[in-house]
Image (tube, rainbow, N blue to C red):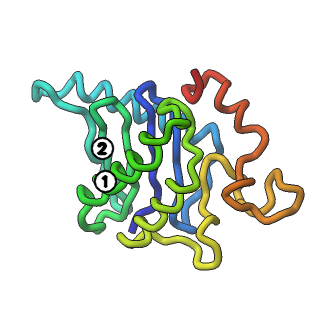
Amino acid sequence: MIFSIYIINKAGGLVYNKDYSEGLSKLTSNEYLVLAGTFHGVHAITSKISPVPGSSGIEMLETDSFRIHCFQTLTGTKFLLVADPQQPSIDHTMKKIYETYADYCVKNPFQNPEMPIRSEQFDVHLLKLVKTVGGLVPASNPYIVNSHYSSANFNTSGTGGQPMTPSNSLPPSLPNIASSGLGLGA
């Protein structure tokens, strides 16, 4: 089961995250940013202190209840996958996540790789991938997944009481997060 996916840019800023399990504790926007920055720093330090020359840093953190898998691209973008310790084919899943990112974000001329990802096609194809490999999502609406762009309930935040859809799911405060100097903006 896949619990969450995070994408961290080369500077350590969180550019994307989705939680795919209803049972996860909800983090605030700031906690997601701290998580991304902390992992980025620990990843950099472990690559330097490794006794193996040329080490790439942390590839997996394991606990009793979950594993965090990290795939770093040649450009420094990190893909973090939080999954059940028994989840099979993690390498294949990470490759498919990267291919989806390349197809719908890297090839998008309007997407800056250092800025938050706001692509409906990326969300839809990533959701299909997670469903295929066994991630949990609410059955009623495929867009009701938690992300650092939404409120805790993801029902009516910033939309005048209207149900959230991918086109209106970003709260008005997002530009302030991106320009706050926390690693998400230029």
Look at label 2 and name its amino acid.
Phe
Please identify the residue farthest to the left as the structure is shown. 52
Please identify the residue farthest to the front as the structure is shown. 109
Task: Give the residue displayed 38% in from the left and 45% down from the top.
Answer: 102
> Residue tagged by mark 2?
71
Task: Give the residue displayed 21% in from the left and 24% down from the top.
Answer: 49
- Is residue 73 or residue 21 the one in the foreground? 73
Q: Please provide percent x and percent y for residue 1.
A: 39, 69
> Residue tagged by mark 1?
94
Q: Is residue 17 left or right of residue 132?
A: right
Q: Is residue 44 left or right of residue 36?
A: left
Mark 2 residue crowding within 10 angstroms, few (<14) / some (14–19) / many (20+):
many
Q: Is residue 37 left or right of residue 68?
A: right
Look at label 1 and name its amino acid.
Met
Task: Give the residue displayed 56% in from the left and 49% down from the top.
Answer: 119
Quarter of the image for residue 178 reads top right
- Is residue 120 or residue 15 the one in the foreground? 120
Tell me: residue 140, above or below residue 116: below
Q: Earlier in the sequence, mark 2 or mark 1?
A: 2
Tell me: residue 5, above or below residue 180: below
Q: Is residue 129 left or right of residue 69?
A: right
Q: Please provide percent x and percent y for residue 94.
A: 31, 53
